[in-house]
Image: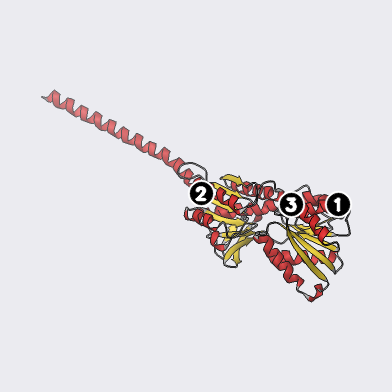
Amino acid sequence: MKKFLVTCLTVVMLMTIVAACGNNNNNGNKGSSASPQASNAASPSGDSGAKKKFAIIFKNTGNPYGEKEMEGYKKAVEELGYEAILKAPDQPTAEAQISMIEELISQKVDALAIVANDPDALQPALEKAMKAGIKVISLDSAVNAASRLVHINQADPERIGRTLIQGVVEMIGGSGEIAILSATSQATNQNLWIEWMKKELEDPKYANVKLVKVAYGDDLRDKSVSETEALLKSYPNLKGIIAPTTVGIAAAGKVLTDKGLKGKVQLTGLGLPSEMAEYIESGVCPWMYLWNPLDVGYLSGYVADALVNGTVTGKVGDKVTAGTLGEKEVIADGDGTQVMLGDPFKFDASNIAEWKAVY
């Protein structure tokens, strides 16, 4: 009997030791699995371990300015550790962008930045995206305030519009006919700049300057060439062209060069230094303006990140730390809000050689 009791006690003790060892092993497993979970929470990856997806939709393909803008966005997104999705339709239409928005909703992206082909037509699709939890921003060419959380603006629209008029008027000697070669008729940024151009022209000092036409090249090179040629044909006394679009100003520069109109028809606007260097160096375009589209995209990536992580909501007064660009503040923009990159920069013969290799 005594031997039986000793045997039972021995078995019980062994079972207790095994159970204790088992619990210690389980606790050790929990400790080792907690580490990567904590790492995931601190990293840009979600609970599933997949990287967050930040998408951008530009107006259309084949646009060098747009390619630089998307490149800047991609740089910021990857700098932050996320996956960048770059998209652009073949044609600059709202319908094409809507199709892409629907596709990105189904992909469950975390953020969507869009350069709008129309300020209002995209609203139903973008509202659907926001209801699905996607943080939507616009950049460059804005959507209406109901379709976004915040807009990323290149520069003060008033300063852009007034500066372009002041520049062309100086070029033409204070009097004569001028025309504007814009992108699409629905482009919000172009229309706002044109509105400020017209307001600047209301000043009595421009009494001898006449705006004869606003033409639209739809940010397509061939159409912009055709529209420039049509302006020259329709207005034989035309003295200046303002093209507030990188595609349009390059197309106009080529037409004026090919037709030998250097000095007869002046050209200014917003252009890429790499594309406009030959026209500035030749004198066809005495000077032009722009900002860095890489920076516009880069800033957009950081604003999107702040919205996704909840450090800002897009309200006036919010501050975003935007990588190498430093801190930027959210300010009012009509019914919505915006983040401003900075002032337009003047490119002329004195600095174009330096900048043409940059972008």
Q: Which residue is mark 3?
A: 223
How far from the left and from the top, in percent, is residue 52? 52, 46
Dot placed on the residue nearer the N-terminal end, 2 or 1: 2
Badge nearest the viewer, 2 or 3: 3
Q: Secondary structure at mark 1?
A: helix
Residue 355 visible in the displayed image: no
In depth, the one of 39 and 224 nearer the eye is 224
Dot placed on the residue nearer the N-terminal end, 2 or 3: 2
How far from the left and from the top, in percent, is residue 341? 66, 59
Q: Which residue is mark 2?
A: 105
Q: Secondary structure at mark 3?
A: helix
Q: Which mark is residue 257?
A: 1
Query: Cα distance, mark 2 to mark 1?
Result: 46 Å
Dot placed on the residue nearer the N-terminal end, 1 or 3: 3
Q: Residues within 10 Å of mark 2 (few under 14, many from 20)?
A: many
Q: Amino acid at mark 2?
A: Ile
